[in-house]
Image (cartoon, helix red, strand yellow):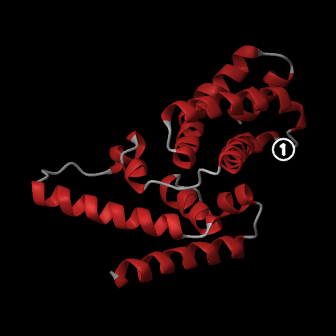
Amino acid sequence: MQEELLVKQSLKGSHEAFEELVIKYEKSIYNIAYHYLLDRELALDISQETFLQAYQSLKALKDQTAFGAWLKRICRNKCLDYLRKNKEQNLSLEEIMSAETTLAKLPAEERTPEKSVAEKENIAHLERLLKEMPAEYREVLILRAFEDYSYEEIAQATKSSLGTVKSRIFRAKKMLKEQYERV
């Protein structure tokens, strides 16, 4: 309810209300941009562009209770546009794994040199597998595994049916498992 009120106040011209929305979503939007682009500065730029477009297009938001999903869709579309224009769709799993948000989720443990080497080899192998994966499968994995999107949120973000999302996630996991086990 608080979010809906902030959206309504923003529509009436309250810069403070929109600033509260920015504060609420800035980490989430940055994380989405970073996981797509794997570049901190570029992710910051895309985040700013996302909020600017949201502010300018706020009147086009039909369901004020869905502000967060709408904002994330703007960010995702900006990232995909950038990737299409620059043809840099190669994801680096090592960079994804080193992202601050991902590291925060990993348990702290003592690393031996042997563990470090094995870890790097596994990451390099997974990175190659992700690069070879079709974009629609790679995208749903990013949204599910790294952004913690629900199936419904992924369906909304990708403008796909729920069944399509479930199918793509299943196939992507199966593809990764089969390819990983081959080597």
* Picture residue at 25% right of the left edge, 51% below the top: 107
Question: In this rendering, would 64 be left or right of 125?
Answer: right
Q: Looking at the figure, which quarter contains the N terminus?
A: top right
Q: Position of residue 25 (x, y in %)?
A: 60, 34
The one of 168 and 120 positioned closer to us in this rendering = 120
The one of 176 and 168 positioned closer to us in this rendering = 176
* Picture residue at 45% right of the left edge, 54% below the top: 92
When the figure is inspected, residue 170 is found, relative to residue 87, above or below; the finding is below
**Residue 153 figure quarter:** bottom right
When the figure is inspected, residue 7 is found, relative to residue 133, above or below; the finding is above
Q: Position of residue 53 (x, y in %)?
A: 78, 31
Question: In this rendering, would 156 be left or right of 123?
Answer: right
Residue type at mark 1: give it.
Asp
When the figure is inspected, residue 154 is found, relative to residue 59, above or below; the finding is below
Question: In this rendering, would 127 be left or right of 63?
Answer: left
**Residue 140 figure quarter:** bottom right
Residue density around tag 1, few if under 14, some if 14–19, many if 20 or more, within 10 Å: few
Question: In this rendering, would 120 be left or right of 54?
Answer: left
* Picture residue at 43% right of the left edge, 50% below the top: 96
**Residue 133 figure quarter:** bottom right
Q: Looking at the figure, which quarter contains the C terminus?
A: bottom left
Label 1 belongs to which residue? 63
